[in-house]
């Protein structure tokens, strides 16, 4: 690290990039960056920290910068090209993060789903008991002086997590996703297998995942879950409208009774992984209990608000497994209410590859609405539309437009769950305005 340079982030609003920028800023380094001018949910943290965010322009690239390039941008990006032409140091996001890990007890969180929620929970819990730096994939990052722990999200996409050599790694699951890169489930498994070889002390993996059970590593693998063969077990689970509680055992050793104000089976598992890490790092489990109780969640993961008589939930879910988990959480918290899903499919390749699974998961809602498919920078079009998914849904499937959310006005005292990794919040905002205006007129 260099105090004489300015760390310049190309694509600073990216969820991991903004988190990393905040860490460097907290540690006293000079930080600025560039991105699109459209507002994103990661932007507020950068603004509050006073980090300068410029529109993309190759004129931004000057002497004295150390460039950190977001993985969403190719080497043809004008700013990256200019930086290389000037001979400035240019490092990709995941490579830079990998170089920061030595010197800490580093804990990576990997998995096809659940990375951000688990990283957020682990960061919160450990921060309450010891100095902790962390990088969460919701745009949240914190650099803490003399930190004992460094908790970070380890993304499997394009095998970026191969840049990391952490002390520990939590692996939440192995599932087929990112069909624009991975050729199939075996390719995804091999990526996790390769990453497991780089862990220095231990791996914590979900015991019910058959692919995680296939892993072989040079360090111990501790499985967590609800099965008899799991090393860390949650027993006597009680799920209510207030959250979940359960007993935790390590083998035959009783570790205590734990509560979380979180919903869905996946959050019981996520918290169990956190407890397992704390156990091996000899953190006081009574303190862990307290920290688990006051965790409020991460951005865009089951974020709730009330508008008029409706409960609106915003969630990043964009894979069938994530949709299932989010709807399960909604059912737990609101067992008596109608659950309406509004889903924005994310990328054409994912929609084609997982079409039947999407329909199966969405049909867990009482009523389903779709938006048009959200394309990505890598993938502008495809041979599928939301109408193809709608045809497989038996709980509705009407396609909404952001300028006409009136079909949702048919529901009262119900729960609407907006899900997607694109700009589904645009539809959510339109619906909220419609509800608010209607409520105002009625009053």
Image: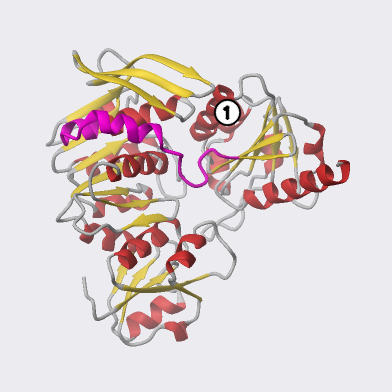
Residue in front for this viewpoint, 110 or 101:
101
Residue 119 in the image: above or below residue 75: above
Name the side, left or right, on which 93 lies relative to 377.
left
Residue in front for this viewpoint, 305 or 93:
305
Q: Which residues are magenta?
A: 276-304
Residue at 47%, 65% (x, y): give it. 48
Q: What is the residue that sits farthest to the right in this orientation?
A: 442
Residue in front for this viewpoint, 414 or 17:
414
Callout count: 1
Give the quarter of the image for residue 334.
top right
Give the quarter of the image for residue 214.
top left
Residue 155 location in percent, x, y? 35, 48
Question: On the image, numbered disc 1 is attached to which residue?
Answer: 330
Q: In which quadrant is the C terminus drawn?
A: top right
Residue 277 location in percent, x, y? 23, 34
Q: Few, some or many C-alpha atoms within 10 Å of disc 1 (few <14, some 14-19, many ≥20)?
A: many
């Amino acid at each position: 690290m260099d105090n004489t340079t300015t760390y310049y982030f190309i694509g600073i609003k990216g969820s991991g990039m903004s988190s990393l920028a905040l860490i460097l800023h907290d540690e006293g380094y000079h930080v600025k960056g560039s991105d699109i001018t459209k507002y994103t949910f990661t932007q507020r943290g950068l603004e509050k920290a006073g980090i300068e965010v410029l529109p993309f322009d190759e004129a931004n690239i000057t002497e004295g910068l150390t460039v950190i390039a977001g993985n969403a941008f190719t080497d043809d990006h004008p700013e990256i090209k200019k930086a290389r032409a000037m001979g400035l140091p240019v490092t990709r996001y995941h490579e830079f993060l990998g170089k920061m890990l030595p010197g800490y007890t580093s804990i990576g969180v990997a998995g096809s789903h659940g990375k951000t929620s688990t990283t957020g929970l682990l960061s919160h819990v450990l921060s309450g008991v010891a100095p902790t730096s962390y990088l969460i994939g919701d745009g949240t990052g914190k650099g803490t002086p003399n930190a004992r722990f460094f908790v970070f999200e380890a993304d499997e996409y394009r095998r970026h997590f191969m840049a990391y050599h952490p002390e520990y790694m939590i692996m939440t699951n192995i599932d087929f996703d990112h069909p624009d890169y991975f050729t199939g489930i075996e390719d995804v498994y091999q990526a996790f297998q390769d990453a497991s070889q780089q862990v220095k002390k231990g791996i914590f993996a979900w015991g019910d995942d058959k692919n995680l059970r296939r892993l072989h590593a040079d360090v111990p693998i501790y499985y967590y879950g609800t099965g008899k063969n799991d090393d860390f077990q949650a027993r006597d689970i009680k799920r209510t409208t207030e959250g979940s509680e359960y007993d935790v055992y390590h083998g035959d050793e009783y570790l205590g009774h734990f509560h979380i104000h979180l919903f869905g089976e996946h959050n019981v598992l996520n918290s169990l992984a956190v407890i397992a890490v704390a156990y091996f790092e000899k953190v006081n489990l009574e303190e862990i209990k307290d920290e688990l109780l006051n965790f409020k969640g991460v951005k865009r993961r089951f974020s709730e608000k009330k508008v008029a008589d409706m409960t609106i939930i915003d969630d990043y879910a964009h894979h069938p497994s994530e949709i299932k988990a989010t709807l399960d959480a909604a059912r737990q918290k609101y067992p008596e209410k109608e659950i309406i899903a509004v889903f924005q499919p994310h990328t054409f390749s994912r929609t084609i590859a997982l079409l039947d699974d999407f329909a199966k998961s969405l049909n867990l809602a009482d009523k389903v609405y779709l938006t048009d498919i959200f394309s990505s920078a890598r993938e502008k079009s495809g041979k599928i539309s939301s109408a193809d998914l709608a045809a497989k849904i038996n709980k509705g499937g009407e396609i909404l437009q952001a300028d006409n959310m009136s079909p949702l006005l048919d529901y009262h005292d119900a729960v609407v769950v907006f899900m997607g990794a694109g700009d589904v919040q645009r539809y959510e905002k339109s619906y909220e305005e419609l509800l608010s205006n209607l409520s105002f007129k009625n009053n």
